[in-house]
């Protein structure tokens, strides 16, 4: 097979790249995606749903062997990797994520430019954000009205009694309720902006960008169920890729130009496997070094998280099980020296899972929105079936630990505030541990078990607190954590999780920056004909969920490639 532009990875970014680059009828495009197809009329119900809590737990939609190290280890024990969900489906993260649609602070993009990504300041990025969206609630200079992604805020009829009361309680405590999360960057609480279309359904980029009309273009070929195993080069010029179809049949696709959209874990992995990366590490695995670039797989970023949860009395529970659950957010500034405004984020969740216990649990899911810790990923085998080692080194920067500990304390205060009387019951610490992930797997057995536990907890009356502490938090109480700093440190270090926002592993920068992997145009430094255009290229993590920033990146780099910038 032979094409002009070969796009590897059909995720949030890859589908945008395919749609935009195929607008030029003279350019042949092949899009290769490892996961299954998603199209209008052929979309799994859990992917289409506005309630997203099943899609990312379905093993058919994710890279099942991928694990990652998050934070610290228990005393006298090694660090243990946990499953780390990343999409393997056409549309990528946008087909399984929590639908939150925000961009971060203007300062995040000005920072990208300051770090060497020339031309990526807020003034340059804002018009692209606007062009991507059709905001159904707000207009004006910060919003778009006719882009492919419909955005809206959770309405009065949808908001759960618990979420509504948290917002009012926070308002009374000095964190004002504000109308627009995507408006002026300021602290407060906001109804969540979600990418939900006018029928109330998810819009993965595999539908919003790869519309039936786009798919009919004769110059666009979409290959799903195909895994790219390695890039091919002639000298230092990329000339194609080796791909493996289901059934292990390998073949090559020749191309004039290759664009990686395989995401922040698998785009650097493909570079490493193809000989682009830290020379010593590659040689140790017997991979011939094509280009010694130390930055490949470094600068791995996430938003470290921890939660405070409460058992919900019946009247405070989500009334519609199909409703989106991340209904509001709380943005605040830690005030810690060297951190910017609005560096902290809490998702105010009406429920904690698809099952009966989840439906009865509300939570404040905190994350450090401007995190300072940086991790890495590296190959451990030449075998393309073996996932890389991923180590986020969360909280390795003390500032992240300090902020997350303070967040847990604040969350406890808010949920225990008398203003919450009637919509909260027992308050307890929570996090997305491997145990919780196991329990959360969709299926009849888990549904039955959770149903029995929910019934037990509902009927437990004065024994509920003891039962939650025994079964849910396994002996850890909130009182102990907020009164004992060492216990809190240990709990946060052990239980810190992510938010599924990996980024930065092929970061943009200037050619003389030894840790830069791509130029500000997305071109891989040191070789020709190869680009990266996904969450990997972010120089620093934005104060945002990362889907909209990634789509903006794909839009811009597609534009650079289309216009022939070098
Ligand atoms: C569970 C979850 C919840 C999230 N919630 C939100 C949210 O609410 N809001 C938000 O803004 N962001 C959210 N995110 C993050 C957001 O979805 C990602 O930042 C975004 O999808 C990244 O886009 P990407 O194109 O870089 O990578 P992806 O969307 O992950 O796409 C990469 C694609 O490449 C494919 N691929 C990888 N390797 C190969 C290969 N070798 N050959 C062929 N194909 C390959 C993968 O299968 C995948 O489809 C969430 C993510 C997850 C996983």
Image (tube, helix red, strand yellow):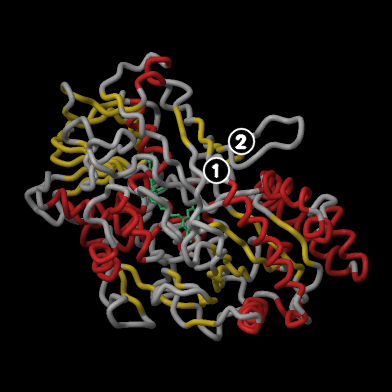
Q: Is residue 355 visible?
A: no
- The image shows residue 35 at horizontal and vertical percentages of 40, 43
Tag shown at residue 63: none
> Would residue 143 appear left or right of 56 to someone viewing this image?
left
Identify residue for label 2: 81
Q: Residues within 10 Å of mark 2 (few under 14, many from 20)?
A: some
Farthest-out residue, front: 337
Identify residue for label 1: 84
- Residue 272 sits in quarter: top left
- The image shows residue 247 at horizontal and vertical percentages of 40, 29
Report if the CB atoms under discs 2 and 1 are less than 8 Å apart. Answer: yes
SS class of the residue under badge 1? loop
Q: Quadrant of the N terminus?
A: top left
- The image shows residue 522 at horizontal and vertical percentages of 24, 45
Residue located 73% across and 67% down the image: 412
Q: Residues within 10 Å of mark 1 (few under 14, many from 20)?
A: many
Residue located 33% across and 59% down the image: 109
């Amino acid at each position: 097979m032979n094409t002009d532009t070969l796009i590897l990875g059909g995720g949030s970014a890859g589908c945008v790249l395919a749609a935009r680059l195929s607008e030029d009828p003279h350019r042949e495009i092949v899009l290769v995606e490892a996961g299954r197809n998603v199209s209008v009329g052929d979309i799994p119900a859990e992917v289409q749903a506005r309630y997203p809590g099943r899609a990312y737990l379905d093993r058919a939609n994710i890279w099942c062997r991928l694990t990652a190290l998050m934070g610290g280890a228990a005393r006298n024990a090694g660090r243990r990797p946990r499953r780390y969900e990343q999409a393997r489906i056409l549309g990528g993260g946008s087909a399984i994520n929590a639908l939150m649609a925000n961009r971060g602070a203007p300062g995040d993009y000005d920072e990208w430019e300051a770090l060497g990504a020339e031309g990526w300041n807020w003034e340059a990025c804002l018009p692209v954000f606007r062009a991507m969206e059709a905001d159904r609630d707000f207009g004006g200079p910060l919003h778009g009205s006719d882009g492919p992604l419909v955005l809206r805020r959770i309405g009065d009829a949808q908001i759960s009694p618990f979420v509504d009361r948290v917002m009012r309680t926070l308002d009374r405590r000095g964190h004002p309720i504000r109308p627009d999360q995507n408006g002026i960057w300021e602290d407060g609480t906001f109804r969540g902006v979600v990418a939900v279309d006018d029928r109330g359904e998810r819009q993965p980029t595999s539908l919003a960008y790869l519309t039936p009309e786009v798919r009919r273009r004769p110059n666009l070929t979409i290959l799903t169920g195909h895994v790219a195993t390695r890039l091919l080069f002639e000298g230092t010029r990329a000339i194609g890729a080796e791909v493996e179809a289901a059934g292990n049949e390998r073949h090559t696709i020749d191309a004039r130009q290759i664009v990686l959209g395989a995401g922040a874990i698998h785009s650097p992995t493909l570079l490493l496997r193809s000989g682009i990366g830290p020379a010593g590490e590659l040689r140790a695995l017997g991979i011939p070094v094509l280009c010694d670039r130390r930055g490949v797989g470094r600068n791995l970023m996430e938003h470290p998280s921890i939660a405070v949860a409460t058992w919900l009395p019946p009247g405070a529970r989500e009334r519609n099980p199909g409703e989106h659950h991340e209904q509001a957010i709380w943005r605040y500034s830690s005030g810690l020296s060297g951190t910017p405004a609005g560096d902290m984020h809490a998702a105010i969740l009406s429920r904690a899972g698809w099952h009966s216990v989840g439906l009865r649990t509300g939570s404040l899911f905190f994350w450090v929105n401007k995190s300072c810790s940086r991790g890495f990923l590296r190959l451990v085998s030449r075998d393309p079936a073996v996932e890389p080692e991923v180590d986020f080194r969360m909280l390795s920067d003390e500032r992240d630990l300090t902020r997350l500990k303070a967040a847990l304390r604040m969350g406890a205060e808010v949920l225990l505030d008398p203003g919450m009387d009637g919509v909260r019951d027992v308050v307890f610490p929570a996090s997305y541990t491997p145990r919780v992930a196991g329990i959360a797997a969709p299926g009849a057995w888990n549904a039955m078990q959770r149903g029995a536990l929910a019934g037990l907890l509902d009927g437990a009356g004065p024994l509920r607190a003891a039962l939650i502490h025994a079964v849910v938090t396994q002996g850890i109480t909130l009182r102990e954590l907020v009164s004992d700093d060492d216990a809190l440190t240990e709990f946060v270090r052990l239980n810190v999780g992510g938010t599924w926002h990996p980024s930065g592993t092929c970061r943009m920068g200037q050619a003389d920056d030894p840790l830069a992997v791509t130029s500000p145009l997305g071109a891989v430094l040191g070789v020709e004909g190869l680009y990266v255009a996904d969450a990997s290229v972010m120089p620093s993590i934005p104060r945002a969920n990362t889907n909209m920033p990634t789509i903006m990146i794909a839009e811009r780099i597609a534009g650079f490639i289309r216009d022939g910038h070098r």
